Amino acid sequence: MKVIVTERIADDGIEHLRKDGHEVDVKYGISHEELLEIIENYDSIIVRSVTRINEELLNKGTKLKVVGRAGNGVDNIDLPACTKRGIIVVNTPESNSMAAAELAVGLAYAIFRNIPQAHWAGKEKKDFRRNRFLGNELDQKTVGVIGLGRIGSIVATKLKGSNMRAIAYDPYITDEKFKKLGVERCETLEELLKQADLITIHTPKTAETINMINEEQIKLCKDGVRIVNAARGGLVNEDALYNGIKSGKVAAAALDVLNPEPNYDKKPEEQDYENKLFELDNVIITPHLGASTDEANYNVGTCVAELVADALRGDMVAAV
Ligand code: NAD
Ligand code: MLT
């Protein structure tokens, strides 16, 4: 059968599909419009977080049987529209959790100690005096984890290892899990916001979580709070964050995800992202690097390829 892969996955995954007898077209960075033109030729499509699988695409993709999400979040896929058409959607939620958690912890350290800004000042031969980059320690501070699932749990554990007090808000997680992780439960988001020196967000993007950190929530935070979002763009409202940083209420923020999310597979000359948060020295932004490790790439690529091959063969698979 014919499979199109629209975002970068490990070569081992592509090889797996080819060995299984499938014809695989690799079209990294393809635009939505280009994809609409050719999707009718494919039985399956493998995507990451940028390609939008929406009604428009599904209406054209009349042969589609399987959508493979190489990674975790499925907010770019219209699941009801796929279900309506009998299209199976598979993803690989476990395969990049460690990579994403490690990035979130790295971002926390980076914004507590101004590491990227200091490096940049030296590289650009700007003001490289060390007193410009005075930071704070994570030790003995409070981390507030929003969403204590796969990634949030790892982040909480790792930051407890940095001698932080860990609190979390996740109404869907049992007391037993909180106890096992040694994390204090906050009954409300407000309770967390009032105590945390560092807020790190690890929820999916849903109607309930979009803009969950808005102007109002930022007002409730401690002065000098730092915020990490390595989950999904739009969970932290970007205007509210911009204003929070400008006013000094928020000391720093690190974002691995933006709203809207640029297409990070585009060549440098074609990149067209615009975001006013880039103007701010104490906001650091990475191009959705959470899953970008050799280990996660391999896990995600091989896992999604196996699932797609199984589903195309008609074997039983755990669909989203
Ligand atoms: P998960 O499903 O294991 O955990 C999410 C947790 O959020 C769950 O425990 C759920 O109960 C909780 N939650 C849901 N709604 C909530 C709400 N309104 N308030 C508080 N908690 C709520 O997901 P995960 O695997 O830990 O992934 C977390 C996020 O990270 C997702 O958005 C995922 O797409 C994203 N992610 C990003 C990268 C990256 O490259 N930056 C990599 C992997 C995953
Ligand atoms: C995910 O949800 O798995 C991550 O956002 C990583 C990605 O696929 O880009």
Image: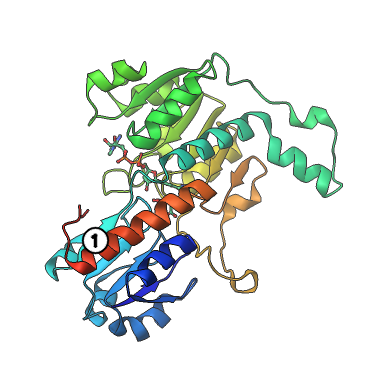
Residue beneath disc 1: 89
Would you say 297 lies left or right of 23 here? right
Q: Is residue 212 above or below residue 318?
A: above
Which percent across, then down, holds residue 13? 41, 62
Q: Nearer the viewer, residue 246 or 88?
A: 88
Left or right of 298 in this view: 270: right
> Could you tell me if residue 290 is visible in this image?
no
Say which amino acid is labelled 1. Val
The N terminus lies in quadrant: bottom left
| Residue 292 point in image, percent of width and height | 52, 50
Q: Position of residue 307 (x, y in %)?
A: 28, 58
Residue 107 vertical position relative to residue 46 in the rendered view, above or below: above
In the rendered image, residue 90, in percent from the top left (x then y), is placed at 26, 57
Of 19 and 242, which appears nearest the observer? Answer: 19
Q: Eyeballing the image, is 179 above or below 225?
A: above
Q: Is residue 297 visible?
A: yes
Q: For residue 188, which quarter of the picture?
A: top left
Disc 1 is placed on an element classified as: strand
